[in-house]
Image (cartoon, rainbow, N blue to C red):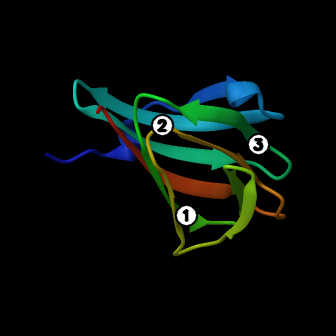
Amino acid sequence: MLIDFTAVPQAVVPHFKGGDKEALVRKYEDENGKILILTLQPGASIGPHLHDTSSEMIYVLSGQGTVTGDGAPENLFPGRCHYCPKGHGHSIRNDGTEDLVMFAVVPRQ
């Protein structure tokens, strides 16, 4: 199966999970989970939230930011992959000067 994210409509999500500004989201979803392209403009964030029913894997395509998982901040930049296991929480902030673009997979568990 091929997913062409250039053909997936982009949704603007204000204050994603209680974060600052807005997130731009292209999402494919079926009974097995979600696959997303997430874009945070400079200063935007995804607020802290718990993954109580699923894990999440986020691969950084471009830009820079900070992910805080279980209270520990880590730098995000292209080539890095953040993993948030089921039962854990995280938040993400674009503290760079360019868009932070991420590819994320959230499997149903």
Q: Quadrant of the C terminus?
A: top left
Q: Earlier in the sequence, mark 3 or mark 2?
A: 2
Vertical order, 21 against 62 (above or below): above
- Packing grade of label 3 (10 A; few <14, some 14-19, many >=20) is many
Give how far apart the Cα atoms at labels 1 and 3 are. Answer: 14 Å
- N-terminal of the pair, mark 2 or mark 1, is 2
Residue picked out by circle 3: 45
Q: Which residue is mark 1?
A: 60
Q: Secondary structure at mark 1?
A: strand
Identify the amino acid type marked 2. Answer: Arg
The quarter holding residue 94 reads: bottom right
Tell me the CA gap for discs 3 and 2. Answer: 16 Å
> What numbered label is drawn on residue 28?
none
Q: Position of residue 107 (x, y in %)?
A: 32, 39
Residue at 45% x, 48% y is 85
Image x and y of residue 67, in percent: 69, 56
Q: SS for tag 2?
A: strand
Tell me if mark 2 has few (under 14), some (14-19) or many (20+) residues whose alpha carbon lies within 10 angstroms of its own: some
| Residue position for label 2 | 26
- Residue pictured at 83% horizontal, 35% vertical: 20
Q: Relative to 19, is 108 on the left or the right?
A: left
